[in-house]
Image: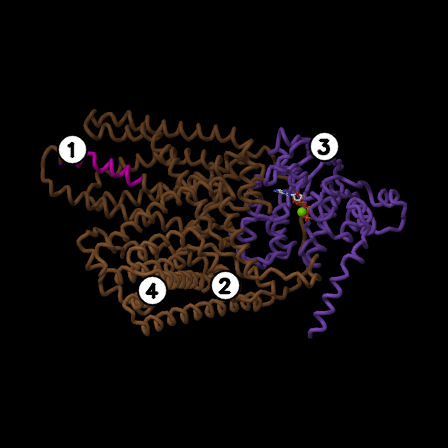
Chain colours: A purple, B brown
Amino acid sequence: MDTYSIWAEGLTKTFAMSGGRSTIAVDDVSLHVAPGEFYGFLGPNGAGKSTTIKMLTGLLRPTSGRVVIAGHDLAVDPLEIKRHIGVLPEDLNLYERLSAPELLLFAAQMYGIPRTEAQRRTDDLLNLMELTETGSKMIVDFSMGMKKKAALAAAMIHSPRVLFLDEPFNGIDALSGRAIRDILRTMTSRGTTVFFSSHVMEVVEKLCTRVAVIANGSIVAEGTLADLRKQSGDDDASLEDLFIRLVGREHGGEADKQSDDLRWLNSEAETADDRK
Amino acid sequence: MTVSNASEKPVSHFRLLLWLKFRLIWGALSRSKFSIVGTLISALILFPVSIGFAFMVYHFVRDSPSQMPNILKDILATAYLFWFLTPLLGFSLNDSYDPTRLFVYPVRYTTIFTANVVGSLFEMSTLLVMPVLIALLAASVSSPTLGVAEMLLLLLFLLQTIAMGQALTLALLGLLRSRRFRDILIVLFPLIALARYLVTPRNFSGSDLYSLLSNPAWNFANYFPPGYTASAIDALRVGDWARAVGAASLLVIVSILTVALAVVLLKQIFNGERGQAPANVKVIRPVARRRETAVPGRGELHGALIPIVALSEKEWRYIVRDPQYKAMGMNVVYILGAFLYSFSRVFSGREMLGGGVVESWLSGSLHIVSSIGISGFLLFGMMQLVCNVFGGEGPAVTMLFSFPTPRRWFIVSKNIVHGTLILLVGFVGLGVFDYVTDGLSALPLSFVWLLMSTPIVLAAGNLVSVQFPSKLIVRGNRMSSGGQVSLGTSRGVGCGYGLLYLCCLAAAVIAEIPAAAAVIIPSVGLISPVWYWLTLPLGLLYAAFCYLQSLKLIDAWMITKEQAIILKLAPSD
Ligand SMILES: Nc1ncnc2c1ncn2[C@@H]1O[C@H](COP(=O)(O)OP(=O)(O)OP(=O)(O)O)[C@@H](O)[C@H]1O
Ligand SMILES: [Mg+2]
């Protein structure tokens, strides 16, 4: 397992709910990701993607299971792991009262990078993310996409060996999106592992060397795009088709089950039209 | 979906909104054991007080019925003033659902507003007023029909009062939506509170009661709903029907106007949300050169120091920029002012005692003892900071804990900044105190005391911070690190934590006894002051020992508490 960047066995997370009940958000998930891989983590809403990422990055303690990142056991040496990973959490959680340069400088120094080097990296990343012009504006006053770019920059400022990105391309404009994709590609070509969740199938299809699909807390498919196609027996299927087939099956229904049940949606719309 | 089922009547918006309100009140109350305990404690303290006051009013009105019109007007005016002032202070007496979230539904603004007002009748603040009003009526009413009519009038008055308070909150909410305004207001609120405290009459004696009750100052209430209500009830009693109807209609009209005003405000907020300027167009520039950077050498000597400096810098920036800290700072200034005032009075009183043994003893040690007292009260004002070091992080705590820095450095760097702040405030406070009371010779000793006591208090605060993390609560408003004020305040939680911090301060005081002894014993002449050369270094050593012990404990606790702190400050729902 030391040869893997990300190695997880039997990851499970149970949340206690009110009334003594509990939900299993992630159920016996195992992941093996090699160095330099661009790994896509797909799944419908509420499937357990963010919960898995939080467990892999030490922000949430698993109910059971073991995580080894870059050769270190998360339960034994979490700080050593945090030295080597970068995280973009789903809800960012930035220091919003700092400006973007201040935040990046702060983050770099938290990884022990000396001031001058930290300043250089900050300038480079601000340039890359098109955030140079924000100047001393505080992050509170940023737009959603700007906040996400600042968070992304903070996650890569220490050139981590493994990057965990939870929906990195949500709300990012096309220009920055392209720049970020390019830089991520360069990073993986030099051995950085990128583990990211996304709902945008086109991006995943373009970037990822391998993908895992999670539904209801369990992995339902894993492999390269070619593997998945072979599994489904359809050699021309797009990732979106494959995804819908996989997840639809898991949910116990066909994708177009709505046609009958949702007729009222159209009729209501018509009556609304009539009223005009 | 049952939408298409035409025979079934939909639930009215009003009932739905009432349900929402009760659900939110209940949710806020039952969220944690702290809020339950806090609410229970405040109910156990406040309701007996309210009922006791009601009994007093009952007997007073029984004994002197002629005072009834005055008392009625005064009590109503006081309640009205309360509901008027609290929104200005940043509190709300009634929890509200966020009306702006309801705009997406096809609900009328009037319904949104009135449902909230009616629901507020059943909140603690309103229930606390009821016993007094009931006592007033019970003590003086002559017939059941009259009683019912008066009850209705009082109910309308209560509704109007709540509506006024809510409308005021709405008016402020428009301002609160802008971050800059919010920042300014958060600092202003404590100032207003301070002003209110200063104008409150003290040293009030019972003999002035009659003159107070009929003080002409109350007449201002005649122009406001309390006046109309009191006048209508009074008119009912004397059988002046024309005046009763007139005053009652005035009350109705004002109530309708209040609702109308609130609706206008709601509409404005809604429009303001929509009418925001479009996102500014971005200038496209080519992506600049990228440079590959090397991982820094691990063996760097000052590697451990860099994060501490970065953290302290960040903490300091937050203290300067985040208005919640400014509000806290105002608390400290307020406490300092109050105590300097009262202590300097004690000292001017002492001068009148004249010379003597007592006098010389006092001049020797009273200064140092009162310095200790003052520093204690200053610390009390900063307890929210000291006992909740992670509170100011808000959701950003997720980022903090994703860094590979050893956890004790988080605490140490926060302590460095907070400690510096405490020492600064303390030095200034004690310096002013010693100057005002003519005891500058005690100054060096006071400073040593501060140096000694600060690490101990920080140590106690650290332990509480790790075991009981919570979001920062400033003046009843719960704030995230982004600075959003949530509308639904949670006084229960605040009360629970207040109690906890008080306990923490008590524990710190106990831990301070050896340090205090090191400063006091030689000063009161029990042993020669020469002993200071021994007691003071020992005291400082003791303080350092306490602090280091707390760090040791925290290292052990952090392993299990880290997740809980993240969940508390950055809940994922
Ligand atoms: N703190 C929590 N307490 C209780 N349940 C939780 C908590 N966090 C997540 N869950 C539950 O765990 C499940 C998985 O959530 P998760 O956020 O991992 O989904 P996701 O795959 O990231 O979804 P999305 O695509 O919407 O981001 C959901 O059912 C969610 O309700
Ligand atoms: Mg998610």
Residue identifier under label 3: A10
- What amino acid is labelled 4 in the image? Pro
State which region is magenta: B359-375
Say whether residue A257 is left or right of residue B502. right
Q: Is mark 1 within 8 Å of ligand 1?
A: no
Nearest to N terminus: mark 4 or mark 1? 4
- What amino acid is labelled 3 in the image? Gly
Say whether residue A218 is left or right of residue B309. right
Discs 3/2, front:
2
Can you say whether B507 is above or below A44 in the image? Answer: above
Nearest to N terminus: mark 4 or mark 2? 2
Can you say whether A89 is above or below B288 in the image? Answer: above
The residue sitting at 36% across, 54% down in the picture is B129
Asked if the residue under mark 2 is in contact with the one under mark 1, i.e. CB atoms within 8 Å, the reply is no
**What secondary structure is the stretch in magenta mostly built from?**
helix
Dot 3 and dot 2 within a common chain: no
Under circle 3, the secondary element is strand
**Label 2 environment density (alpha carbons within 10 Å; few <14, some 14–19, many ≥20):** many
Which label number is shown at residue B226? Answer: 4
Q: CA distance from mark 4 to mark 1?
A: 56 Å
Residue identifier under label 1: B361
Q: Is mark 4 within 8 Å of ligand 1?
A: no
Q: Residue B282's x, y, as percent?
A: 63, 64
Asked if the residue under mark 2 is in contact with the one under mark 3, i.e. CB atoms within 8 Å, the reply is no
- What amino acid is labelled 2 in the image? Phe
- What amino acid is labelled 1 in the image? Trp
Q: Residue B176's x, y, as percent?
A: 47, 60
Residue identifier under label 2: B113
**Label 3 environment density (alpha carbons within 10 Å; few <14, some 14–19, many ≥20):** some
Q: Is residue B417 visible?
A: no
